[in-house]
Image (tube, grey):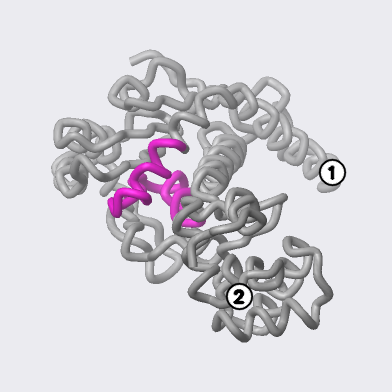
Amino acid sequence: MAQQGTEERRPESEGLDQRAPAEAAAFLFAAQAEAARAATACADSLPPAAAAMAATIRAGGTLHYVAAGSSALMALADALELEGTFGIDTAQVRIHMAGGVPQDSSMPGGTEDDAEAGAAVGALAGPQDCVITVAASGRTPYTCAAAEAARENGAAVIAIANNADAPLLKAAHHPIFLPTPPEPVAGATRMGAGTAQKIALNTLSTLMAIELGHVHDGLMVNVQATNIKLRARAEGIVAAAADVPREAARAALATTDGAVKPAVLIARGAASTAEAEALLSASGGVLRRAFTLLEKPGTPA
């Protein structure tokens, strides 16, 4: 097997262990920043993949995140924040990590070779679902088997990998190749490759949220205000989106029991939570469309 790019030695890493700590740190920063810049090469691949994720959420399907090792940690971080940031129902998100999510500081190792377990995970996905697979090498047996099984079951398959022409990319409807350079520490894909993966995953889920109407003018208008910080943030979001003082935003949120989108509409003139919800239903949950309906006579009540 030809050596994969993520396993190659980086010439500039020669003598890394002999450098002054500050010099070594500067090199490691620069290497990861280079990997982040490399992620921009996949920009055109992301919108159709995000559209597939949004279609799954609209249809009541499930997003399945599938990965092993460091790649799984990147996928885990993205998946776990979908509820709090964008209000995605946790029942519509499942996380499949080879060997299971660690309960201590021990990372599962050999489980990434378990293709049978990966195939079983992929078989859980159906035609309404979307499977997001991530592997730096693009060859991880667990992840590749999951992608293949999910595709056979009719699920939409997204693949993120850092090696060109990887089997995982070939198994996907939406291949996303991240052309990151060799790692500053050869094979340590939690660094450059992982940095690029996190950028790609966060961008994917944010594009999905935009399509679902959960982002308005850079505001997370479907945020779940579950603590003091987020309740204050919700007030600020309603005030900004509706262009009203915070006091009015606070009153609107009290009317909607903390739901941001209907509160925005109430702050802009909707007569009740019922009218706000009707406007959101008619506009597909997109506030900008709901604003237009609110300004027209005979809007749904």
Q: Quadrant of residue 265?
A: bottom right
Residue 84 magenta: no
Mark 2 in CB contact with mark 1 (< 8 angstroms): no
The answer to whether any part of residue 114 appears in the image is: no
Residue 62 magenta: yes
For the N terminus, the quadrant is top left
In this view of the protein, which residue sits in the foreground, 283 or 73?
283
In this view of the protein, which residue sits in the foreground, 25 or 51?
51
The mark total stands at 2
The residue located at (62%, 59%) in the rendering is: 294
Label 2 residue SS: loop
Label 1 residue SS: loop
Residue 6, compared with residue 3, is above or below; it is below
Q: Quadrant of residue 207?
A: top right
Q: Is residue 90 left or right of residue 215?
A: left
The residue located at (49%, 61%) in the rendering is: 300
The residue located at (33%, 25%) in the rendering is: 173
The residue labelled by disc 1 is 20
Q: Position of residue 292 (x, y in %)?
A: 64, 50
Q: Amino acid at mark 1?
A: Ala
In this view of the protein, which residue sits in the foreground, 204 or 107?
204
| Numbered range of the magenta stretch | 51-77
Q: Position of residue 104 (x, y in %)?
A: 42, 70
Real-space CA distance between mark 2 and mark 1, rounded to the nearest whole angstrom: 65 Å
Q: Amino acid at mark 2?
A: Ala
Q: Is residue 177 left or right of residue 229?
A: left
Q: Position of residue 70 (x, y in %)?
A: 46, 47
The residue labelled by disc 2 is 271
**Neighbour class for label 1 at 10 Å: few (<14), some, many (≥20)?**
few
